[in-house]
Amino acid sequence: MNTEFIKAFSEIIREEITRKNEVQVEGVGSFELKHQKQFQKQYDNGRVVMMPPKDTIAFTPENSQGI
Amino acid sequence: MIIDKEQLIYLLVDKTGLEQEQVKGQLSKLIKRINRAAEEGKRFEVEGFGTFSVEKGALEFTPEDTLQTEINNKYAGMKPIELIGAFKKPEEDEIPDIAAGSAGDKGWTFDEQAAGADADTEMDDDLEKKPLQEVEDMPEQESASEEAQEDFEKLISKETAATEFASDEKNKSKKQDEDPPKEEEEKEDPIGRLLVAAVVVITLGVSGFLIYDLGLLGKDSGSSVAYTQAEEQPQNMQTSENVAISANDSKDRSEPDEPEEVGTPEDNPESSENIQSTYGLKGEFNPATNNGYTIVVHSLRSLEQAESNRQPLQESGYRTVINQANVQGTTYYRVGIGQFETIGAAQEAIDQIPEPYQSNNFIKRIK
C-alpha cells in the first residue's frame, strides 16, 4: 500500500461519484452522490432564506446495511 | 450503475498500471486499516479524500473540503438568498429541514398572536386619542387660517395704499406692521406660521412688482443697494452689457448730484463739448479729470500686452488710458479710449473709434 495507490483510489471514487455511480467498497461501505434540492429555510430569528441546491457524498457503512 | 469490487479493481488497475494481484492486495490492506482504526475508535484520514470515523457504533465518512467542492462544482459559489417579506409556513411545503421548520413555525404563530395583541391595544389607544386630537386641532387650524386671511387682506389694503405713495417711510411702517402678527402666530401651530410666511413672501413680491411697474425704481433709495451689488459683479467684454452698466452708472451718478438727470444722458453732450480740453476722444490723456468715463477696447491680463495694444491707438492720436481692474481675483488691464464726462458722450463717441472696436467695447468709469 502506497500513497500512489491511495491517490488512485480516491480519484476513482471521485470520478465515479460525479458520474452518478454508486461505488461499493467491500468491507467498508458504499459511496453515492446525493442531490439536495434548493429549499426555503427559516431561522429562529424569523429570517427566511432560500438555500442553494447542492450535491454531496453520501456514505453508507457496510455493517449497518444489514441491521 | 453500481461499481462493485470487481469493477473497482479493474478501474484501479487501469489507473495505476499495477498488476491485478497487487491492486487486490493494496485494496484489502486499505480496507483492513480502515476497519482496524474503526474498531479502535480512531479516525482514519485519507489525504485528498476524507476521514473515516466511528459515530455511535457505525462507520462514518466526512469528505474533505476539496472533494466536497469538486462534487458540488455545479452549484459552487451559490449562497443562501434572503427572501424579504416571503414568510411561508414550513408545514405546507417540501422543506427537508424539519427541525428549523418546526422552530420557525412556533416562532411564527407566537409572533402572529403577539402582533395581533399589539395591534388591538394600539387600536384602542388610537380610538381613545383620535377624537380628542381632532377636537383640539380643528378650531386652531381654522382660526389660524382665518387670521392669516385677515392679515393678508389687511396687508393687501395697506399695500395698495403704500404703492400709491411709494415712500420709504410707508414701507418701513408696513414692515413693522407685518412683524407683530408673525410673532403671535409663532406661539400657535406651524401651519398658521407657514401661511403667514407665505403671505409675507407674496406681499413682498407684489409690492416689489408694483414699485417696479409704476416706474419708481429710479427715485427709490432701495434700488441703490441693488446697484452696488451690480457694480461688484464682474464685467465682461460684451457689448450687450453696455446698456446695463450705463444704466447703473447714470443712476449712481445721479444720486449724489442732481436727481433730475436720471435716464436723460442725451442732455449732456453739450456740457462735454464746453469742456473740450479736459474731455474728448482725441488728444492727450488728462490725469486730473479722474472721474470721467472711457471706452474700454481691450481687457488683458498682462500689463505689457495692454501697453503694446495701447501704442498704436496712442499713435493715431487717441487719448488712451490703462485701468487696472480686479475681477474675481484676477487682475485685468483695461485699455480705454477717450475721456468723457458722461456716458452719453462716450456712447456717441463710439461711432468715431476704429472699426474693430465699434462692436466690441464697453464704457467704464475711470478710477
Image (cartoon, coloured by chain):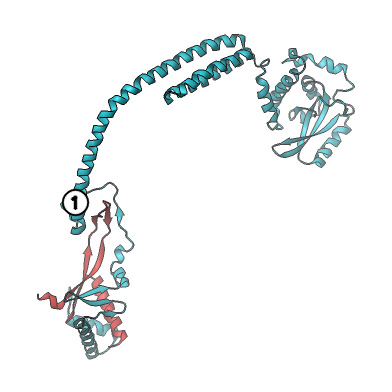
Question: Is the residue marked by circle 1 packed among few (<14), some (14-19), or many (20+) residues within 10 Å?
Answer: few
Residue A46 in percent (x, y) is at 26, 51
Residue B290 falls in image quadrant: top right
Residue B299 placement, left or right of A36:
right
Query: Chain for mark 1?
Result: B
Q: Residue at x 63, y 15 (%)?
A: B168
Q: Residue at x 48, y 15 (%)?
A: B152
Q: Residue at x 30, y 54 (%)?
A: B81
Nearest the camera: B324 or B363?
Answer: B324
Nearest the camera: B359 or B232?
Answer: B232
Q: Residue at x 26, y 77 (%)?
A: B51
Q: Quadrant of the N terminus of chain B?
A: bottom left
Q: Quadrant of the C terminus of chain B?
A: top right
Chain A on-screen colour:
red
Chain B on-screen colour:
cyan
Residue B278 in percent (x, y) is at 88, 23
Residue B83 in percent (x, y) is at 29, 50
Q: Please name the residue that numbered disc 1 is placed on.
A: B106
Residue B215 seen: no
Residue B295 falls in image quadrant: top right
Q: Amino acid at mark 1?
A: Lys
